[in-house]
Image: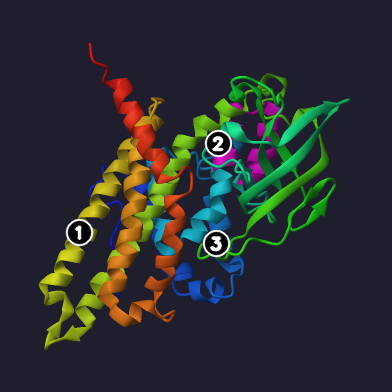
Amino acid sequence: MPVNVTSFEGIDLHEDQVEILRTIREYVDRDVLPHVREYEEPDVFPEAMVQPLREMGAFGMRIPEEYGGMGLDLVTYALAIAELSRGWTTISGIVNGQYIVGGMIATHGTEEQKERYLPRMAAGEFRASFSMTEPEAGSDVQAIRTTARLDGDDYVIDGTKMWVTNGLRSSLIALLTKTVPDADPGHRGITTFLVEKEPGVERQGGLTIPPALKKLGYKGVESTELVFEGHRVPASAILGGEAGLNRGFGQVMSGIETGRINVAARGLGATMRSLELALQYAQERSAFGKPIGQHQAIQLKIAKMATDVEAAKHLIVAAARKKQAGQRADVEAGMAKLFATEIAQRAAEETMRIFGGYGYSKEYEIERIYRDTPLLLIGEGTNEIQQLIIARGMLKRNPVP
């Protein structure tokens, strides 16, 4: 009988929240876990897994109810991402663009932008992607080089973006650009554009989408470049309209804390699944005349993983609750992201050790998890950057009188 480690045990949740999380877990157990290999190994988009998500309304989890979404609080959202990632981190990646871009539009968009995009995004009919990273700019957002210059009633965009999840299949790109290239400091000249395009089309106007990047893990969802050469968009594409001009940095930073909670939740989900696999295998596999779970060396690994799951869960919930309350949560989100992603990679390796030689075989799920977790250490700011954010935040909060 499969082992299940439940992400919402020990958390004070109301009945509706628990029901949502149970529904997602049932979906994962039924539609994801039994079929991951069919899509992961050939690196094929799992459309059959996505349709049930649309039917559940999962694409609208963070979109306000008045625009057709579920309007979930941040705690429920974070635990829902953990449940999805327990099945396959790719699934949480497929829906994540909706949450990032939908949140930016709901918070900073004009009423026209909200009405145009949010209902279709909530229904999963209109997929979105977020594009910030460039070949020369990752954690240093102010170093972006993609420009948007005003030409008549349009802006003309030039530059290259990297590592855009859902870059090909999305219908909308939230694109970070420099509208004042020589601004000092640089963040004062950054603007976010909502760039529409046809999903699945490799060339449109001045936008070219090269073949998807080849990756160690995180397969089944494309990660692409976006190459802009004289691509024209109307001035109305600025997020927030005219008032949003040169305010893109603040718009993005307000969502980064949520993004880090998201990545932390992915780490929690992956760790939960590693622990489940370790617990099951430790009771099924025997060595030296007894199940290996009765050997102290294996028990020490399981104890550490189980403790890490509980610690990560509470760090994530604490960060989500503080952010939900409207407070700054940069330190808490950084702590959650740092801890939960580091334990995800460690748990994958420890479970692989428990499996022994079998863990190195593609016939066993842990091999995939071992390849998927390293990306979490990098996404939404590397863990080295998280440590700097935490340290600086703590120094600022605790000055010497």
| Labels 2 and 3 touching (C-beta < 8 A) | no
Q: Earlier in the sequence, mark 2 or mark 3?
A: 3
Q: Amino acid at mark 1?
A: Lys
Q: Residues within 10 Å of mark 2 (few under 14, many from 20)?
A: some
Residue 170 seen: no
Disc ID at residue 103: 2
Determine the residue positioned at 55% across, 26% down. Answer: 250
Is 10 left, or right, of 333 in this rendering?
Answer: left
Q: Amino acid at mark 2?
A: Gly
- The residue to which callout 1 is attached is 304
Residue 334 appears in which quarter of the rendering?
top left
Residue 79 pos. (x, y %): 37, 49
- The residue to which callout 3 is attached is 52
Could you say whether the residue bearing mark 3 is in a helix, strand or loop?
helix
Residue 269 appears in which quarter of the rendering?
bottom left
Q: Is residue 119 magenta?
A: yes
Residue range highlighted in magenta: 100-121
Main SS class of the magenta portion in the image: helix
Could you say whether the residue bearing mark 2 is in a helix, strand or loop?
helix
Residue 132 pos. (x, y %): 61, 40
Q: Is residue 225 above or below residue 334?
A: below
Check the picture and name the quadrant holding the C terminus: top left
Q: Residues within 10 Å of mark 1 (few under 14, many from 20)?
A: some
Residue 165 pos. (x, y %): 60, 53
Could you say whether the residue bearing mark 1 is in a helix, strand or loop?
helix
Residue 61 seen: yes
Q: Nearer the viewer, residue 17 or 233?
A: 233
Q: Earlier in the sequence, mark 2 or mark 1?
A: 2
Image label count: 3
Q: Nearer the viewer, residue 340 or 388?
A: 388
Q: Nearer the viewer, residue 228 or 325?
A: 228
Q: For marks 2 and 3, give the CA distance.
A: 22 Å
